[in-house]
Image: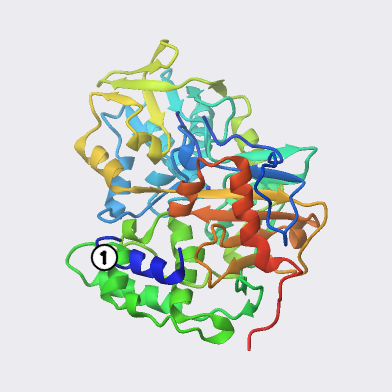
Amino acid sequence: MNRRTFLLGTFSGLSVLALSGCVPEPTPTGTPTPTSTPAPSLVPQPAEMLRTSWSDDPFARGSYSFAAVGSTPQHREDLAEPILDRLYLAGEAVSIDEPGTVQGARGSGQSAARALLEVAEPGERIAVIGGGIAGLAAARQLTAAGFTAVVIESRDRLGGRIQTVSGDAWPIPVELGPSFIVSGGSTSLDEELTGLDIAHEQFLPTPEVRTPDGTLATVSPVGAEVVTAALAWAAEQAQDTALAQALVATGSATLSMTDGDAGVSDADWLDYQLATSTTLESGAPTEEMSGWYTPTPATIQAEDTRIVLGGYGALIDDLAADLDVLYSSVVTRIGYTETSVSLRLGTGESLTVDRAIVTVPLGVLQSDVIEFVPPLPFAHRGAIAALGMGTLDKIWLRFDEPFWDTEATVWTTVGDDTLDFRVWVNMLPLTGEPILMGLVSGERALALATVDDTAFTDAALRSLEPFAVLATATPAP
């Protein structure tokens, strides 16, 4: 699809997105098996590859929640409300201040545990459904208070959407889930990582931008300005509207497609803003994003972003130490009364506890694979339906030697909206290893979710061509 077709399709109005789970997960894969389709000539085949497919993972059904059209922060508050003082929901989608983040999920689990402890009697048995960071944080707080808590995890591992892979093929820990801590100054998470000797450091998010032929380009403010204007328009409307509709209403469909500096038009810069920032943060297309609650483009201060290099998995291991965990156990039914909570597992086994904290991802709750008896209260069901579940997938590539000569840690592309991976993190300056991490989100992530490893890798390698040393990397005029 060319740029003109993309813009007309996206902005035509009506024609017109990192934790624990309950139903297989993105399986780390090795070097893709070659097929008859040749790899791009400018970029060599990687020595090793790992990928994710979170939307296709029945234990996650997406990567993180976002503010969908019609949703409000009140919906997250509704999810946090205890049900008969027996059932509690937790996870990143329940976090009001930091949804979609590791610290938000952890904080939500701790809040649910505190609420439960206010009403629980000594000797009660508690079930925590989901062994991601929200569930583990809750279980850790409950056991510290002297209660018996069992963690019921559907996978054969803990961590949920936090998944760190280590091995002989990879000289550094590979994060298939979240890699960053955003707004680290407002959370104790980085202090905990330091205490556990988990390497993490300040991350400078300033990108190096290239056009399809490798020409360096200077980011134009046009894209951010257009999105900001659209959100300002949406804020004044009587009803919430999609960001796509707001862009149409503020004239984005008529942006100039005439090439400017480095052969990049204003329309290209809007596409760039959406692909590398706005939709990347939500994991969703603009037609699903709330015009009222989508964050306005803003420069993130460098000190507010840190990258985890020593493995998030070590944090999971620390939280899980000495906890009672039931692995490979899928919860299919949760019954609750004013006196107890009963759980049915996929194996047919049953378990009765005094109270339970449910930390499965929003995407799992939306899929109705867990039956609640009686059905959850109306406010909870309304919140689950209203919030959105976005998708961001990753590919990690290890090369025998670098094919690039830039020392920039973040790479982005402008001027070719057919590329799937528009954002890359160059790990070489950070670790000394020729390793790249590519990001794909929203509709493109959904489209790639079910393709085989070869097709997934080929899409990534094609997106890397502008950064190959054979490309013409000349400064923009």
Tell me the element at label 1: loop
Residue at image position (71%, 41%) is 31
Q: Residue 97 is drawn in which quadrant? A: bottom left
Q: Is residue 451 left or right of residue 240?
A: right
Q: Using the image, determine if residue 410 lies above or below residue 128.
A: below
Residue 196 at least partly seen? no
Q: Residue 120 is drawn in which quadrant? A: top left
Q: Using the image, determine if residue 227 lies above or below residue 362.
A: below
Q: Using the image, determine if residue 139 lies above or below residue 305.
A: above
Q: Residue 222 is drawn in which quadrant? A: bottom left
Q: How far across and how far down the image is residue 146, in percent?
A: 50, 24
Residue at image position (35%, 64%) is 10
Q: How far across and how far down the image is residue 86, in percent?
A: 32, 26
Residue at image position (64%, 65%) is 410
Q: Is residue 35 left or right of residue 451?
A: right
Q: Nearer the viewer, residue 381 or 225?
A: 225
Q: Nearer the viewer, residue 385 or 12?
A: 12
Q: Amino acid at mark 1?
A: Gly
Residue pushed farthest bottom?
A: 477
The quarter of the picture where the C terminus appears is bottom right
Q: Nearer the viewer, residue 266 or 458?
A: 458
Q: How far across and how far down the image is residue 354, in percent?
A: 36, 19
Name the residue that disc number 1 marks: 13
Residue 355 at least partly seen? yes
Q: How far across and how far down the image is residue 326, in percent?
A: 53, 19
Residue pushed farthest front?
A: 36
Q: Nearer the viewer, residue 455 or 111?
A: 455
Residue at image position (38%, 73%) is 227
